[in-house]
Image (spheres, grey):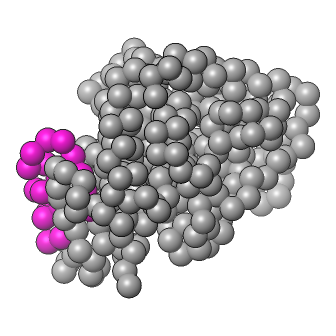
Amino acid sequence: MRKKITVVGGGNVGASCAVNLALKELGDIVLVDVVEGIPQGKGLDMLQMGPIEGYDVHIAGTNDYEPTANSDVVVITAGLARKPGMSRDDLLLANHAVVKGVTEQVAKYSPNAILVLVTNPLDAMCWTALKISKFSKNRVIGMAGVLDSARFRTFIAQELNVSVENVVAVVLGGHGDTMVPVVRLSNVSGIPLNELIAKDKLDAIVNRTANGGAEIVKHLKTGSAYYAPSAAAVEMVESILKDKKKVLPCAAYLEGEYGVNGLFVGVPVKLGSNGIEKIYEIQLNGDEKAALAKSAASVRELVDVIKDKV
């Protein structure tokens, strides 16, 4: 029996996600959006791309949730996108309301689904989805670290003029300006970064990674990144549906790990058919612990604003 994947949000991220899911033939796809005609039109367009690209999955667009019933995975991308000068945190209250409404519908029609959150501010939206769905914590996962580490890997590969495939990068913490690219644990084919890149250049790459989303928003002016974020979400979905058990950096609900309790923070996890099957707790040095604590504190500030609204 084919897997069923729902993508909520028919904008740039959601549509790109749906296309990538179809190209990988991960399952039949339902695209949901509140704007009448958008998911239906985009879904039909993607369906007609199948004979050309050689994928054979069913793709449907809808404005309600009944057709999404019994989805295996639901990717939530719905919400407002950032505009120039706007932080992820500025989106907090508006997108909290969106994610709350979406999660209520998803939990009603697909009570056994695994949720992959993409909507910003990511860590706070994961918290909203967990509290509203009442799902077990392993079934609510945030897409952040896969994207952030991809950006880190890209900038390292550019600096060294080497293949991105040889670059391993570790990024922890909240999905925002306080994220923690862990230079000590990142390498190129096992060679530590500090043996390859001067400290000032490495610091600049770390800073560019932390502000990677804002850099793209500044270029686009009327929207935010969508190709890399959607690809990151699809990598997570693939690991879940194929039970690949990839170890990926994702926003996970921590209950004491890394000294964090009751928050979603980006950490390395094993993703399989049960969602998050293991959280890996890396031994951090003093500076790294301090940076992660600062990042978690910024996430807690956001959650404190919305915790009485669930």
Question: Image point 25% across, 43% down: which residue?
Answer: 11
Question: Image point 33% across, 37% down: which residue?
Answer: 101
Res 186 visible: yes
Question: Image point 79% across, 52% down: which residue?
Answer: 280
Total labels drawn: 0
Q: Is residue 155 left or right of residue 167?
A: left
Q: Is residue 117 left or right of residue 36?
A: right
Residue 180 counted in the magenta span? no
Quarter of the image that includes the N terminus:
bottom left
Residue 44 counted in the magenta span? yes
Up the image or down, 94 lies above or below 276; here it is above
Question: Image point 64% across, 45% down: which residue?
Answer: 252
Figure quadrant of residue 86: top left
Q: Is residue 227 left or right of residue 178?
A: left
Work out which residue is located at the far bottom of the displayed protein and give it. 1
Res 13 visible: no
Up the image or down, 306 lies above or below 226; here it is above
Identify which residue, 167 or 33, lies in the foreground.
Answer: 33
Figure quadrant of residue 201: top right
Residue 64, horizontal then vertical, whole percent: 19, 51
* Range drawn in magenta: 30-48
Residue 119, horizontal then vertical, whole percent: 42, 38
Identify which residue, 131 or 287, lies in the foreground.
Answer: 131
Identify which residue, 233 or 256, lies in the foreground.
Answer: 256
Residue 303, horizontal then vertical, whole percent: 56, 23
Residue 218, horizontal then vertical, whole percent: 38, 24
